Amino acid sequence: MSAVLSSPVTRAPWRQRLRARSALWLLLPMAAVLLATPWLPAFQVTLLNHVGLAAMSTLGLVLLTGVCGMTSFGQAAFLGLGAYTAAWLTAGSGVPAALAPLAGSPWLALPAALLLTLAIAGVLGLLTLRLSGHYLPLGTICWALALYYLFGTLEPLGGHTGITGLPALRIGGWTLDQPQEMAVPIWAALGLALVLAHHLLDSRTGRALRALNGGQAMAESMGVPVLQVKLTAFVLSALLACTSGWLYAMEQRFVSPAPFSLGAGIDVLFMALLGGVGHLWGALAGATLVTLARDFLQDWLPRLLGQGGNYEAIVFGLLIIVLMHKAPEGLWGRLRQHRASGAADGAAAGPVPSAPPLPRRAMPARGSLVLQVRGLTRRFGGLVANRDVDLEVRAGEILAVIGPNGAGKSTLFNQLSCVDRPTAGEVRFLGRSVVGWSPRRLAEAGLSRTFQHVKLLPGMSVLDNVALGAHLRGSAGLLRSALRLDRAEEARLLAEARRQLDRVGLGALAQQEAGSLALGQQRLLEIARALCADPSVLLLDEPAAGLRLQEKQALAELLNRLRGEGLAVVLVEHDMDFVMSLVDRVAVMVFGEKIVEGPPAEVQRHPKVLEAYLGAEL
Ligand code: ADP
Ligand code: MG
């Protein structure tokens, strides 16, 4: 199939080596800051510390908004949660007796703040994340305001004056009460967070997180528990903000509600957008830019324009508009364009190592009934897209569903794959009724599909896109991924993805961005992704559309081989030459009804077919 490939791009080995080690590169700025602080005046170190703190909560938004596609205005509220928990436990009034052992210790306040944030973000996430479109950001505004007013009005939190007199952070006998000293935990924590986030994105969980951004329905079909992954991203982002808030409280030694307002939440979002919301480095770039620019403007504008009026906010707003025009991908996105790199952030680098193959599912016996459709009807209001359809599919056969546009083929596929629920009738998969199942449960049971309108993650590498199909064959979660304890499993998942890519002839393009492929190649990518799930039934919606002749022949060869392995394949296709020479049976649909079914030669000659649909075409 290699003849099918067009212009495979090989990347310079040095670049691959660089990417493989890029987690350590993430630590360079942190090390530079820490080495510089002893020689800088205190006010500059304080400014740098604020950059570090802002970068940490911005990193949360880069993950949530940039990677997962969920916009939140509420990040500052979680900052406040971290800061206020620290302040209240170490210097506040009214700490109940039950919490007395925690009181006074900044170090114990950290896990307490994280636990509280986990609980509150968990509940808020469950309430908010089901909202779609504009309702999600609006929801985040609501609880950001609620938490902000809570900070300002709760008696034990000191109202609008806040809590003062927090004890300094101590490590052993070392008291961290100078900016130079606080720089150590702040920049170390940021470095750690960046490295863990980098690991996370370059993993099974990372692929699922990235799939939330524009690929939720597809991800669910690949077995990704979308709501759970969304909640994970949301809580993780909140925990980063909370840690930043705790460090902020330790650095300031007092807290008041003002820095945790809705406006502050918008600031964090600006930092993420300006820095480059799609890249981990964007968090640092955005935090640096906004913090330093604000400091500069606060210094210089009153000298230029006088003390009256809040010119800083106006100039800042203008600056943001200009930057959004000139660099909509953010500063980091802009820099990356110049580097002309084709791979997505966190994409697996280098050649895929050989790894033991993943275990395979037991296939149904050849010839046994795998899919059974009875009396399937799907109405959309007055329109009947499927009417009383009966269909049977057996292991080791290829069935084609053909019919003119609008005949109801894709609708039928959506019922078969539980993306949609039939109005009446039944679908049985391996003997069990699957009506009402989630696409994820069906994927777990062994049904895999491709989409008529290709659904892939264009910014992610081809290999990562395909590996998403093997999601259910791995188990590494958030912690294992972030701590890099998933490498053996990850190597097996990527090796499987690579094998399936080789199988469809796209092996040489594994490291390309998926969005850069031609449409035909994208369809092949989807087939490789579906095969990665090790299915017993494969549904292909117009797999040959957009393929060149050679690619079609190669695809027919592949489907032939899959049939030989005992797979059941159901495909919707318009290319009659392709269908007739390949498949075992053809079902013809017209206006939502199946009018004829049989071997290709018979169907071709059937008077009903000639009359109703195919006419002179055959
Ligand atoms: P095919 O795949 O055979 O071209 P479809 O299954 O996509 O046809 O569509 C069959 C009919 O159902 C069309 O008339 C289409 O407009 C309609 N249809 C499909 N999906 C929906 C939907 N979600 N809501 C309303 N009508 C729909
Ligand atoms: Mg269709």
Image: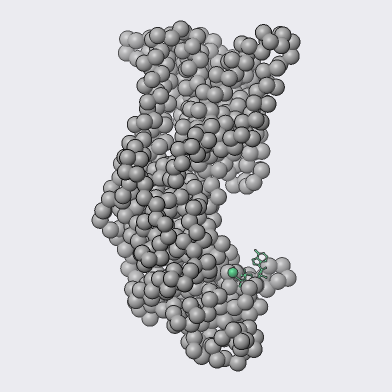
Q: Residue at x 50, y 55 (%)?
A: 456
Q: Which residue is drawn at 52% across and 57% down?
A: 455
Q: Where is residue 567 in the image (x, y as percent from the top left)?
A: 38, 73
Q: Which residue is drawn at 70% across and 17% down?
A: 311
Q: Which of 580 and 603 is in front in this view?
A: 580
Q: Is residue 210 left or right of residue 273?
A: left
Q: Which image quarter is the N terminus in?
A: bottom left
Q: Which image quarter is the C terminus in?
A: bottom right
- Up-down: is 101 above or below 334? above
Q: Nearer the viewer, residue 415 or 564?
A: 564
- Up-down: is 21 above or below 11? above
- Please tell me in which quarter of the rendered image ligand 1 is found: bottom right
Q: Quadrant of residue 467?
A: bottom left
Q: Quadrant of residue 5?
A: bottom left
Q: Residue at x 46, y 12 (%)?
A: 45
Residue furthest toward the front?
A: 7
Q: Where is residue 132 in the image (x, y as percent from the top left)?
A: 63, 47
Residue 297 is at least partly visible in this image = yes
Q: Where is residue 432 in the image (x, y as percent from the top left)?
A: 46, 71
- Up-down: is 444 above or below 155? below
Residue 467 is at least partly visible in this image = no
Q: Nearer the viewer, residue 432 or 593?
A: 593
Which colour scheme appears in the figure?
A: one colour
Q: Position of residue 44 (x, y in %)?
A: 49, 11
How many labels, in total? 0
